[in-house]
Each structure stands twice: as structure tokens, then as C-alpha cells.
Image: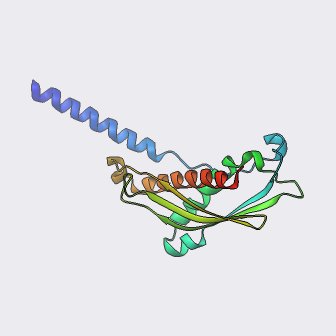
Amino acid sequence: METMSFTRRAALLGAGAFGAALLIGCNAPQAPALQSQAAAGPTAPGVHIGAVAVDTSPILAELGNPTAAWAQQALSAQLAQALASRIAPGEPDAATLSVVVNSITLGGGGPSNPDVMTGVATLDGRRISVKATATWFPNPTDQALPEQAFQGRVQNLSQAFAYWLRRKMHL
């Protein structure tokens, strides 16, 4: 009897892990959208951003796709979210925020070897260098679904990059 209950538990645990892995793969990334000034409400006084342009051509040359495409999509969305109070697409005086992602390094895991994204942002002639890090801890699902794991790591780096850019811009 003891062997039979162990086998049932193992089967249930395995089925649960497999189901969780399938659900992780269903999480499709969301497309970025700049809110209009009317939809977002009035913008805060100070710098207004009319458009956000993200250039990942250095990543495309170094790492290729899909990493460059993931960074393009994720960083555009994260910047739109982080800078929502400053975005005013229809405003004539609004400047374009240009961001160039220079490098992405996916570390080996843990705090001693983090993932790193570096880049430069330009707004109204002001250049701001940004280095963002994110800590990744490997898990068994990452081995089963490596592409989703890499995409998630780029998403986390993009979120950290947007956070640090906003802080450095003093917005």
C-alpha cells in the first residue's frame, strides 16, 4: 500500500507541474500603448513627452532576434507605463524620448551574477546613461520552457531600466 500512495502523489505532483508549465507559456506579452492626454488626464507640469522611440539595433547586431524584439516591445511598454504622467502625444511642445539599448547580458543567476541592460536616453538634448540589473534565480520550469524564461528576464530588465531612467530624469 505504501508504494501505491507514493506513486499517486508523484503522478499528481507531476501533472500539477506540467499544468503550471503550460499556463506560464500562455502569458502573451502586451503591446505598448501611449495614452492620449485626454485619456490619461492632465499631464504634470514640466517636461512633456510626445513620443517614445526605442532603438535596439545594437542588440540586434550582438544577440539577434528574438532578444532584440523582446527588448523593443518590453521597454516601450515599461517606459509608457513609468512615464505616463509625462506623456502628451498631441502637445506641440512635447519632446521625443529616444532610448538606445546598447547591451543586454543575461547572467548565470543569483545576486552575484545578475542580468544587466545598459543604454542611453536622450530628451531635449540631455543624455542620460542607464544601467539596470535584475536578479534571476533558475528553476525547473526555465529548463522546460527556455524561450519564455529568456523573454521574462528581458521583461524584468526592461522594467528595471524604465524605473532607473525615470529616477535619473527626476520625474
Q: Which residue, as the protein is rendered here, is positioned at the far bottom?
A: 61
Q: Is residue 45 above or below residue 99?
A: above
Q: Which residue, as the protein is rendered here, is positioned at the far top?
A: 1
Residue 149 x/y as whole percent: 43, 53
Question: Where on the picture, by quarter, is residue 113?
Answer: bottom left
Quick one: 104 or 34, which is closer to the camera? Answer: 104
Q: Which residue, as the protein is rendered here, is positioned at the far right?
A: 92
Q: Is residue 85 above or below residue 157?
A: above
Residue 22 x/y as whole percent: 41, 44
Quick one: 37 or 22, which is closer to the camera? Answer: 37
Q: Is residue 170 left or right of residue 46?
A: left
Q: Is residue 4 left or right of residue 160?
A: left
Residue 98 x/y as whole percent: 71, 64
Name the quarter where the N terminus is drawn.
Answer: top left
Count of marks, rendered view: 0
Tell me which residue sits at (54%, 70%) in the image.
59
Question: Where on the picture, by quarter, is residue 56?
Answer: bottom right
Q: Is residue 28 above or below residue 7?
A: below
Residue 18 x/y as whole percent: 34, 41
Tell me which residue sits at (86%, 53%) in the image.
90
Tell me which residue sits at (37%, 49%) in the image.
137
Visual colour scheme: rainbow
Q: Is residue 86 left or right of residue 143?
A: right
Quick one: 163 or 37, which is closer to the camera? Answer: 163
Q: Is residue 69 above or below residue 17?
A: below
